[in-house]
Amino acid sequence: MEKNFKSVADRVKEMRLKKNYSQDYIAKKLGISQKAYSKIENNETRLNVEALLSISEILEIPVNNFFGDSKAPMLNDFSSGRDGDNVIYKTINDNAKEDLYQQLLKAKEEIIQAKNNEIETLKKQIEKAE
């Protein structure tokens, strides 16, 4: 790891502190306990994409701000010239892309596993009903 590397969890904590929000406040918004949220910030629990997006909304910051070099611009807003519409140009470094990709893959795998479990449960219920 690089000397100045910050994990996504570190950045979540940093952004929360900048907003002056407590862990308890964020946890309640997420529908989890403060202890569970603390584990996210301490990198004891893997942060899934859905939770990261929710945290991004609560903190009112682009999700990209959790990735890459904090000194590098992660979101630039350029006017498109069409009735005040904006074009959003997002930059994300390769490490952050890989991290996000891995998180998305894991979230997809968890969804597939949950659906497979539901299918198995339904199959068992059908067998019992027959």
Image (tube, rainbow, N blue to C red):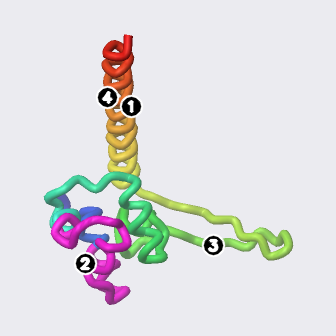
The answer for how far apart the CA atoms under marks 3 and 2 are is 30 Å
Query: Which amino acid does the dot numbered 1 rest on?
Result: Lys
Residue at 45% over, 58% down: 92
Residue at x 32%, y 89% (from the top left corner): 20
- Residue pointed to by mark 3: 77
Q: Residues within 10 Å of mark 1 (few under 14, many from 20)?
A: few
Q: Amino acid at mark 3?
A: Asp
Image position of 130 (left or right of 9): right
Say whether marks 4 and 2 touch (CB < 8 Å).
no
Residue at the image point whose x is 28% and y is 78% from the top? 14
Splitting the image into 4 quarters, where does residue 6 fall? Answer: bottom left
**Residue under circle 1?**
115
Q: CA distance from mark 1 to mark 4?
A: 5 Å
Q: Earlier in the sequence, mark 4 or mark 2?
A: 2
Residue 71 shown in magenta: no
Q: CA distance from mark 3 to mark 4?
A: 43 Å
Tell me which numbered mark, 1 or 2, is placed earlier along the sequence. 2
